[in-house]
Amino acid sequence: MNSAIRRPSEVPDDQVPLDVRNVTKRFRRRGRGQSQPGPGGRRRTYHTAVHSVSFRMRPQEIYGVIGANGSGKSSLIRILSTLIIPDEGDVLIFGRDALRSPASVRPLLNRVSADPSFFRAMSALENLLFYGRAYGIAGPLVRRRSLDLLTRLGLEHEAKEPMTELSRGQQQKVAVARAFLTGPRLMLLDEPTTGLDPRSKRTVQSFISDVRRDGVAILLTTHDMEEADQLCDRLAFLAGGRIVAEGTSEELRAHVAGSTTRNADDVDMEDVFMAFTGRSIEEDEEEPESREELQNDTA
Amino acid sequence: MTQLEDVVRLPAPRRVALGWAFFERQTNLWKRYWAWEVVWVVYGVVNTLAITFIAKEASHGGLIRPGEVSRLTLFLLIGTLTWAYLSAVLDDMSLVITWERWEGTIEHTFMTPVSRTIHLIGMSVFGVVHATIRTAVIMACALPFFDINFSHVNWTEVVAVIAIGSVSLVGLGILTGILPMLYPERGVQMSFMVQALVLLVSGVYYGIDVLPGWLQAASHLSPATFMLNGVRAAMLNGAGFGSEGRTLLILAIFGLVMVPSSLVVFAAAERWAKKTGRLKRQG
Ligand SMILES: Nc1ncnc2c1ncn2[C@@H]1O[C@H](COP(=O)(O)OP(=O)(O)OP(=O)(O)O)[C@@H](O)[C@H]1O
Ligand SMILES: [Mg+2]
């Protein structure tokens, strides 16, 4: 693996990979949402996708972010990827300010998103060549690393096929290769195993645990509770854009067991998911919105 | 402008290597979509012929004297070929954002550490090379149909006008490329409209003095107007740097103003897109 990973040496191993402080992001909405005075005093409808989120990752940790559809996971990842600028808060990546100087953190980051997006007519290798070069890696080295990564992911025969000839799952693996190609120190994985068959899922999961051993910190979102349990050192549950719980899977199970008077061993991660996201969804959709609206209207 | 500072801080070979990433990518795409290139070349040749034959018609119909046919032919040919070149550059640049939206790659590309300046310059260099090759092919296919005397053409001047004019063209291209970032649905149509306006006011098939006064005012805002003037002077009258120095100077000023300002506007538009979550919505 070491041959395939380049590690920007400027970042010490024991530095906090990610420190998120009070990050909030609102999007303008046509339909339902909180009504707030917009710029110029005009009233506009906003939806808070990420709500005062704070957490801090530890070096080389795999940190899971779990939540229902629309709870704000991808929005959070986009903020960390310098693709969305939040309204409030701070993001420090290895001590560098990701919001004020995004250029300084980009070499340290990469990301796999839920849908593998590529230049479809180009081959996997040509796509990887472009992205590798765009991170400043020399062409021959990119080619070597790409072939190495694709082989590890079982795609050595598809490397030169146009992306359109690859199945969705195969494309997803190329997306994993693209992300690790550049030797990131903080990897943002947004549902990396969605749509993969069980064996491919295993391949990608063991790949992820492997690279962690090389000192990469990983933030992972998934809807697969078993995956979350097995891969992640700690988990955060997101509901309505807020972190409603954080801890190791044992801690979270114990917490849920405690509040339901069940035995911790009988509580599985799906129960934990239901406990932390089920109630909060309703809460999110009704109470806080109307409550905030009242506050805003009287203010 | 932190972006520009970043670019300046990198050693030159690294800047070239990063820009090359985009040039190479576009070349790979171009190879895969060669059928489209054939379509554009055929379209360009047909368009060139269709317009240039007007000169023959004018002489047949008695509108001009036979001695003037060659000059009118060259005049129209200059118009069609310059427009083929111009629109090829603008087309490529208007796809900077649009293409990546189609593919869904825009977020991945915007996450790379390449500064937007290098990204856009890499794309522009490809656009200019691509447009040059396409226009040369169109010209080679169209020339056998006409009997044109090139003996008094000042080729050095022609190349100088096109080279210097291309810089401002790139600026214009970057500006139109912004529209699809701001308006994901209508941006492409808007950049076509900008192109159509440039075609009208720049006097591609006529001198701008035939336009109504208010349109002539707009003509002076388009670098294409000066490019066409320069190319015509050099090809029809054999004008050189001496008499056309002013045109070159104006084109140089256009370039010096338009490229940096288009980069600044692009950066502002990008920031706005990132604030409103418009870069891409999916997943
Ligand atoms: N760019 C955007 N513009 C407007 N609204 C957005 C934007 N991005 C996200 N949202 C809204 O923010 C909320 C959170 O979306 P997000 O994609 O972050 O959820 P998610 O947790 O990733 O969901 P899923 O599990 O389905 O992927 C949604 O209600 C969504 O409509
Ligand atoms: Mg998502």
Image (spheres, helix red, strand yellow):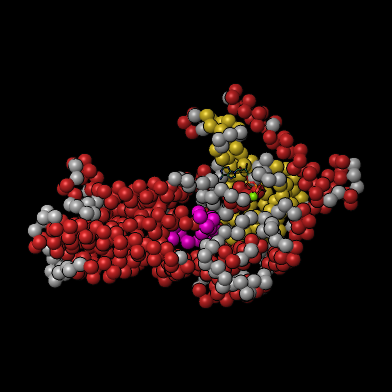
Circle count: 0
Of the pair A281 and B195, the residue shown nearer to us: B195
Q: Is residue A84 left or right of residue A172?
A: left
Is residue B251 something that shows in the picture? no
Instruction: Identify the image quadrant of residue A53.
Output: top right
Residue appearing at x 35%, y 47% in the figure: B193
Residue appearing at x 69%, y 57% in the figure: A194
Residue appearing at x 50%, y 54% in the figure: B101
Q: Is residue A222 left or right of residue A46?
A: right
Residue B18 in the image, given as x and y percentages of width and height: 45, 66
Is residue B87 something that shows in the picture? yes
Ligand 1 quadrant in view = top right
Residue appearing at x 82%, y 47% in the figure: A271
On-image quarter of the N terminus of chain A = bottom right
Instruction: Identify the image quadrant of residue B80.
Output: bottom left
Does B109 lie within the magenta span? yes
On-image quarter of the C terminus of chain A = top right
Vertical placement of residue A278 versus B167, above or below: above
Instruction: Identify the image quadrant of residue B236.
Output: bottom left
Residue B274 in the image, given as x and y percentages of width and height: 51, 48
Vertical placement of residue B247 versus A70, above or below: below
| Magenta stretch prevailing secondary structure | helix
Q: Is residue B35 left or right of residue B46?
A: right
Of the pair A265 and A154, the residue shown nearer to us: A154
What residue span does the magenta drawing correspond to?
B101-119
Does B177 lie within the magenta span? no
Of the pair B204 and B57, the residue shown nearer to us: B57
Of the pair A215 and B61, the residue shown nearer to us: B61
Residue A269 in the image, given as x and y percentages of width and height: 81, 51
